[in-house]
Image (cartoon, rainbow, N blue to C red):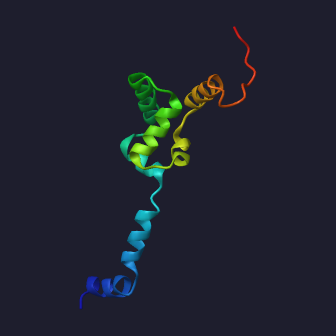
Amino acid sequence: MNEIDQWIEENISNSNLFEDVIETEENLTDSLVITKEYLNKEDWCNYIHKFVSDNKCSYMEAVIDYSETNGIEVEMVSKLVNDTIKELIRIEAEENNMMRPIGRLEF
């Protein structure tokens, strides 16, 4: 038996290798799945801006639609939402009486 066969015998044959692989696949984070499609958070946010403009929908609807279309929990996608989109969602929610308005100065 050569060194490679011996190493395989000692390290792989007696382990739960296949269970480890399955566990790893189940534990992939949604953020990792998202970043495979978009290079970074900013690219993803640009996609959301474009989606809103193309589909004439709200930012909240765009984020929820992305989550549902890709089978990702909204809570995981929320980690990618930048401050600009958060502010736009907040303004939309205030305008639609979904949340209490936060005082703003009108210019």
Front-lying residue, 72 or 96: 96
**Quarter holding residue 49:** top left
**Foreground of the two, 58 or 31:** 58
Name the foreground residue: 4 vs 55.
Answer: 55
Q: Residue at the spot x=24%, y=87% of the render?
A: 2
Q: Position of residue 66 (x, y in %)?
A: 43, 40
Tell me the residue at 38%/83% (across/down): 11
Side (left or right) of 106 relative to 33? right
Q: x%, y% of residue 107?
A: 69, 8
Give the percent coordinates (x, y) of residue 42.
Answer: 47, 33
Above or below, 29 against 1 in this view is above
Q: Quadrant of residue 97?
A: top right
Q: Decide which of 37, 100 is in the foreground and name it.
A: 100
Q: Does residue 52 appear in this view?
A: yes
Corner quadrant of residue 87: top right
- Seen as rendered, the residue at the extreme front is 97
Is residue 22 placed above or below 1 in the rendered structure?
A: above
Residue 100 shown left or right of residue 87 in the figure: right
Provide residue 40's location: percent of width, then percent of height. 44, 39
- Res 35 seen here: no
**In the rendered image of this protein, does residue 31 appear above or below residue 38?**
below
